[in-house]
Image: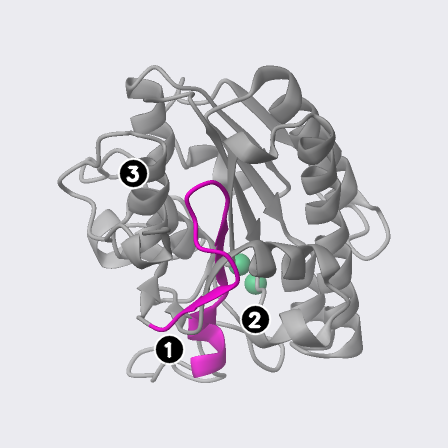
């Protein structure tokens, strides 16, 4: 039944799974220890922000939903996304983000709350903490069925300084502090028992890029460091300190969250419910 519990979806843009151990990231580790995480989670191709996040919300490949680059391309083929399913079931959804094209992840009227603020100085403006504070506030006050928290800085540092560079790892640490702020506020409001957390990335990265190498883009093999993403689920009914060995796709996020929130999964969704993450 919707609204018997709420979910928080953290998306840390460009977060590589191997960065979680190398960066100072106690909050993400807290989620790992309290939940089930994937040893092998993968995103879709091309490994670009908008196609991948559209795939996350619509549980279809970019080739299926039609958003194949970072320009939103409206298409009548677009099946209902997670925000739409929540709205259609009478639930509510909130989103905070700094990347403006994400405004189109849901149909018009699908969101009850949205907050957008672009980074001006990505490495110093503290926008990620501002977004986290806004998310925590709406989460505790309105208890939306889903709160989507988008954190951009790791990707920006990857492009600026290189994936796994000291500057990138510092950005991951700052993203972690934004996650921590939300976790602490949820705990302070005694809402931990009713809240599900899913933390993932849209794609990884290598050198200063993701999605392709330098050179012609057609006929390129995907780079493993771009394709692998973290997938960490925590909350009531989820196994604790469990490492899931099955392959998990970014397409599995929306069905898994919808299932846990008691929502009906649209037939067009291609992903599966990650039942191996649940307690027996
Ligand atoms: Zn991205
Ligand atoms: Zn990027």
Q: Which residue is mark 2?
A: 16
Q: Residues within 10 Å of mark 2 (few under 14, many from 20)?
A: many
Q: Residues within 10 Å of mark 1 (few under 14, many from 20)?
A: few
Residue 238: in magenta span: yes
Q: Looking at the picture, tell me which residue is in the foreground, 122 or 277.
A: 277
Question: Of label 1 and label 2, which has the lower sequence position?
Answer: 2
Question: Where is residue 39 shown, x and y percent of the image?
Answer: 44, 73
Which mark lies nearer to you, 2 or 3? 3
Can you see residue 13?
Answer: no
Which mark lies nearer to you, 1 or 2? 2
Q: Which residue is mark 3?
A: 259
Question: Where is residue 77 shown, x and y percent of the image?
Answer: 18, 40
Q: Which residue is mark 1?
A: 217
Residue range in magenta is 224-245
Q: Residues within 10 Å of mark 3 (few under 14, many from 20)?
A: some
Residue at the image point whose x is 79% and y is 71% from the top? 167
Residue 178: in magenta span: no
Residue at the image point whose x is 37% and y is 56% from the top? 277
Would you say 88 lies left or right of 196 here? left
Question: Where is residue 44 shown, x and y percent of the image?
Answer: 34, 64
Label 1, secondary structure: give it: loop
Q: Work out how far the residue at label 1 is from the one at label 2, CA to CA, in angstroms.
A: 22 Å
| In the depicted structure, whether residue 104 falls above or below residue 176 | above
| In the depicted structure, whether residue 280 falls above or below residue 33 | above
């Amino acid at each position: 039944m919707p609204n018997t519990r709420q979910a928080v979806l953290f998306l840390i843009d460009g977060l590589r799974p191997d960065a979680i151990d190398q960066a100072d990231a106690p909050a993400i580790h807290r989620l790992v220890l309290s939940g089930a995480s994937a040893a092998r989670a993968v995103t879709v191709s091309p490994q670009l922000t908008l196609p991948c996040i559209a795939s996350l919300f619509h549980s279809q490949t970019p080739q299926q939903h039609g958003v194949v680059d970072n320009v939103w391309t409206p298409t009548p083929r677009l099946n209902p996304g997670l925000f739409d399913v929540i709205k259609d079931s009478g639930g509510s959804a909130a989103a905070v983000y700094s990347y403006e094209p994400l405004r189109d992840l849901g149909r018009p009227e699908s969101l009850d709350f949205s907050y957008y603020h672009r980074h001006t100085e990505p490495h110093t403006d503290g926008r990620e903490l501002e977004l986290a504070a806004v998310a925590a506030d709406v989460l505790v006050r309105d208890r939306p069925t889903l709160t989507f928290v988008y954190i951009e800085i790791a990707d920006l540092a990857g492009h600026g300084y290189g994936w796994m560079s000291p500057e990138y790892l510092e950005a991951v640490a700052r993203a972690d502090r934004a996650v921590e702020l939300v976790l602490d506020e949820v705990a302070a409001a005694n809402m931990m028992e009713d809240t599900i957390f899913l933390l993932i990335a849209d794609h990884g990265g290598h050198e200063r890029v993701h999605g392709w190498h330098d050179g012609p883009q057609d006929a390129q093999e995907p780079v493993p460091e771009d394709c692998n993403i973290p997938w960490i689920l925590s909350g009531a009914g989820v196994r604790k300190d469990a490492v899931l060995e099955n392959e998990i796709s970014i397409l599995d996020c929306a069905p898994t969250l919808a299932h846990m929130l008691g929502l009906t999964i649209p037939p067009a969704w291609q992903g599966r419910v990650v039942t191996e993450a649940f307690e027996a």
